[in-house]
Amino acid sequence: MYDDEWGSAERLGNKYFFDPKNIQDPYTWTFENDKHKHFLLYKLVDVIGYAHIQLWPFQKAALRIIVID
């Protein structure tokens, strides 16, 4: 992802998950970890969604965050 895409992912996570609870995003370190995958959903050129998936052994995964604005 590009820097502005990371910023969009972080903004969406903060808006819907972390800011309402007045806590900092505990997952920002995962942006550079190969065991974590991050996906953006676009509507034309605007980022409108974000998902964070953590990969586990034995073909398992955990959906950590999903949001569509």
Image (cartoon, rainbow, N blue to C red):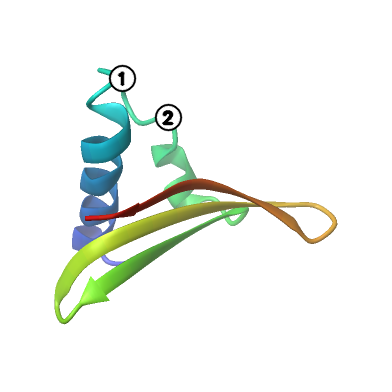
Q: Which of 20 and 14 is in front in this view?
A: 20
Position of the C terminus by quadrant: bottom left
Tell me whether circle 2 and circle 1 mark residues in contact (CB < 8 Å): yes
Q: Indicate which disc residue 58 carries.
A: none
Q: In this view, does 41 lie above or below 66?
A: below
Q: Residue shown at 80%/52% (left/top)?
A: 57
User: Where does the image place residue 63, in percent across and percent down from the top left?
Assistant: 56, 50
Q: Indicate which disc residue 26 carries.
A: 2
Q: Furthest-top residue in view? A: 22
| Residue position for label 1 | 23
Tell me if mark 2 has few (under 14), some (14-19) or many (20+) residues whose alpha carbon lies within 10 angstroms of its own.
few
Q: How far apart are marks 2 and 1 (CA)?
A: 8 Å
User: Where does the image place residue 12, in percent across and percent down from the top left?
Assistant: 24, 47
Decide if residue 28 is on the left or right side of residue 13: right
Q: Residue shown at 55%/54% (left/top)?
A: 53
Q: Furthest-front residue in view? A: 68
Q: What element carries label 1?
A: loop
Q: Which of 41 and 24 is in front in this view?
A: 41
Q: Residue shown at 41%/64% (left/top)?
A: 39
Decide if residue 53 is on the left or right side of residue 65: right
User: Where does the image place residue 24, in percent across and percent down from the top left?
Assistant: 31, 24
Location of residue 46 by image quarter: bottom left
Decide if residue 58 is on the left or right side of residue 36: right
Tell me if mark 1 has few (under 14), some (14-19) or many (20+) residues whose alpha carbon lies within 10 angstroms of its own.
few
Q: Furthest-bottom residue in view? A: 44
Q: Which of 21 and 30 is in front in this view?
A: 21
